[in-house]
């Protein structure tokens, strides 16, 4: 085991161990949502491979596979061959425990906005516990608000305010570079998480989405939420729980409370 890298808790012994930075980087998937230009897919693959990332996921690419993607990937065509193609962001994020949305625009009520460096450090910390994702949007319209709200952090790459949109491949390069820096950030002291008994594993994307669905159902049934006038309640709740980095035990407790409101009274 290497001296640098982030710590992880051994599932067998519960001890804090240092993780190899390259193993951590393998847990970072890059998700491109609705990319229009195959050249950008190739450029993203190359940007990933030079930084040691290998897991590319495409949500509804307009053209893929495509010769232009392969040409722009140069030595990274293997990433394109192994790329997963799915039809929704939920599918792309299945199994992840933390996702960061890349957006040039400020969003109302999205997850907390971070600097790339800060977000990459958080992402690599989370990678010690499971799969994580960087999510990029379409070249013209970017990510939708719904997509951004499915992530726990949002990042804008600082730019000239009058010209803030990077080419998709370039945006992927900046974040993959930051991920690499974070992975090699040096030996860190074991986190308090390692010393805390009884913590459960982080909840996966689908477990957290299952909780939101359940919460919405109960809020509608109790008339707390009027589906005809939802206002901004759901995005606000997503933001709240997104900051909490829910563990599976916590999701189960919250869902248990919701289920109790749905159960018939005991007597
Ligand atoms: N016109 C679009 C930008 C699309 S660029 C918009 O306003 O959102 C394609 C993708 O690259 C974006 O969806 C985002 O994921 C990423 N990107 C480009 N510039 C960025 C920046 N300054 N900060 C964060 N992400 C950026």
Image: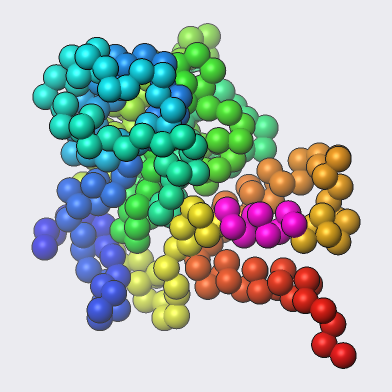
Q: Is residue 133 visible?
A: yes
Quarter assignment of residue 135: top left
Give the percent coordinates (x, y) of residue 71. Answer: 18, 14
Up/down of 112 relative to 66, above or below: below
Q: Is residue 220 magenta?
A: no
Q: Which residues are magenta?
A: 209-217
Give the percent coordinates (x, y) of residue 212. Answer: 64, 55
- Split into 4 quadrants, where in the image is the N terminus? bottom left
Please indicate whether residue 74 sits to the left or right of residue 218 in the image.
left
Q: Is residue 210 magenta?
A: yes
Please indicate whether residue 142 sits to the left or right of residue 187 in the image.
right
Residue nearest the observer in this picture, 152 or 163: 152
| Residue at x-position 20% and y-position 52% | 23
Q: Is residue 40 visible?
A: no
Outermost residue, top side: 162
Up/down of 148 relative to 164, above or below: below
Residue nearest the observer in this picture, 126 or 65: 65
| Residue at x-position 67% and y-position 32% | 108
Q: How many marks?
A: 0
| Residue at x-position 71% and y-position 59% | 215
- Split into 4 quadrants, where in the image is the C terminus? bottom right
| Residue at x-position 42% and y-position 41% | 92
Give the percent coordinates (x, y) of residue 234. Answer: 72, 46
Task: Give the prevailing secondary structure in the magenta stretch.
Answer: helix
Query: Which color scheme does this rendered protein use?
Result: rainbow
Outermost residue, bottom side: 267
Give the percent coordinates (x, y) of residue 142. Answer: 51, 22
Up/down of 67 relative to 122, above or below: above
């Amino acid at each position: 085991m290497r001296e640098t890298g982030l710590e992880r808790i051994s599932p067998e012994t519960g001890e804090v161990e240092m993780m190899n930075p390259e193993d951590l980087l393998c847990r970072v998937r890059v998700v491109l949502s609705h990319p229009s230009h195959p050249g950008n897919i190739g450029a993203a693959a190359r940007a990933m491979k030079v930084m040691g990332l290998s897991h590319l996921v495409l949500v509804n690419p307009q053209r893929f596979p495509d010769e232009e993607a392969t040409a722009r990937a140069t030595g990274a065509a293997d990433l394109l061959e192994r790329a997963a193609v799915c039809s929704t962001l939920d599918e792309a994020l299945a199994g992840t425990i933390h996702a960061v949305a890349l957006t040039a625009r400020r969003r109302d009520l999205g997850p907390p906005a971070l600097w790339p460096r800060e977000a990459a450090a958080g992402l690599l910390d989370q990678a010690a516990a499971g799969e994580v994702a960087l999510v990029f949007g379409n070249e013209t319209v970017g990510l939708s608000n719904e997509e951004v709200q499915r992530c726990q952090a949002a990042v804008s790459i600082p730019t000239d305010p009058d010209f803030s949109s990077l080419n998709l491949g370039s945006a992927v390069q900046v974040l993959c570079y930051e991920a690499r820096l974070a992975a090699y950030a040096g030996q860190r002291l074991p986190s308090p998480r390692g010393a805390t008994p009884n913590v459960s594993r982080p909840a996966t994307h689908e477990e957290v989405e299952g909780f939101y669905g359940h919460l919405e159902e109960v809020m509608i049934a109790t008339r707390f939420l009027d589906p005809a006038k939802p206002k901004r309640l759901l995005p606000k709740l997503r933001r709240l729980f997104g900051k909490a980095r829910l563990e599976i035990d916590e999701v189960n407790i919250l869902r248990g409370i919701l289920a109790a409101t749905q159960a018939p009274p005991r007597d």
